[in-house]
Image (tube, helix red, strand yellow):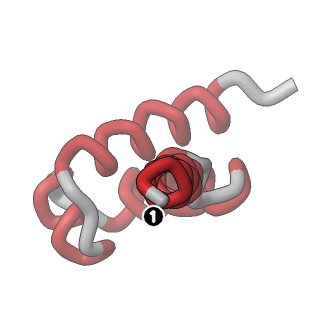
């Protein structure tokens, strides 16, 4: 019985982590968010508040968006 419970617990943890750490936005969405930040926001803090993001998420979006927009081929 304990073995089944442990296996169920571990499977749930794996599923939760997949949801948590899988990409939440496409490159197109990130690119659009970056351009919105670049053209319409005075600070990353205001951008973060507007999109309800943590500062870490905000920085990741801006970094990735910058990469996508400045390195177009």
Task: Indicate the position of residue 42 as horizontal and vertical percent values.
Answer: 17, 58
Foreground of the two, 1 or 12: 1
Could you tell me which residue is drawn at 30 percent across and 39 percent down?
A: 59
Task: Indicate the position of residue 53 as horizontal and vertical percent values.
Answer: 27, 63
Task: Indicate the position of residue 33 as horizontal and vertical percent values.
Answer: 50, 61
Task: Indicate the position of residue 58 as horizontal and vertical percent values.
Answer: 30, 49
What residue is pinned by disc 1? 36
From the viewer's perspective, is residue 66 above or below residue 53? above
From the viewer's perspective, is residue 18 above or below residue 72? below
Label 1: element kind: helix
Foreground of the two, 10 or 46: 10
The C terminus: image quadrant: top right
Drawn side of residue 46 relative to residue 51, left or right: left
User: Dot 1: few (<14), some (14–19), or many (≥20) neighbours within 10 Å?
Assistant: few
Could you tell me which residue is drawn at 15 percent across and 66 percent down?
A: 46
Could you tell me which residue is drawn at 64 percent across and 62 percent down?
A: 29
Drawn side of residue 16 relative to residue 47, left or right: right
From the viewer's perspective, is residue 53 above or below residue 58? below
Q: Residue furthest right?
A: 73
Drawn side of residue 12 relative to residue 26, left or right: left
Q: Residue furthest front?
A: 1
Mark count: 1
């Amino acid at each position: 019985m304990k073995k089944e419970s442990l296996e169920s617990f571990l499977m749930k943890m794996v599923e939760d982590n997949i949801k948590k750490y899988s990409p939440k936005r496409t490159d197109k969405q990130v690119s659009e968010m970056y351009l919105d930040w670049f053209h319409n926001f005075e600070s990353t803090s205001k951008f973060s508040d507007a999109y309800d993001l943590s500062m870490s998420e905000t920085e990741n979006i801006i970094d990735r968006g910058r990469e996508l927009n400045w390195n177009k081929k």
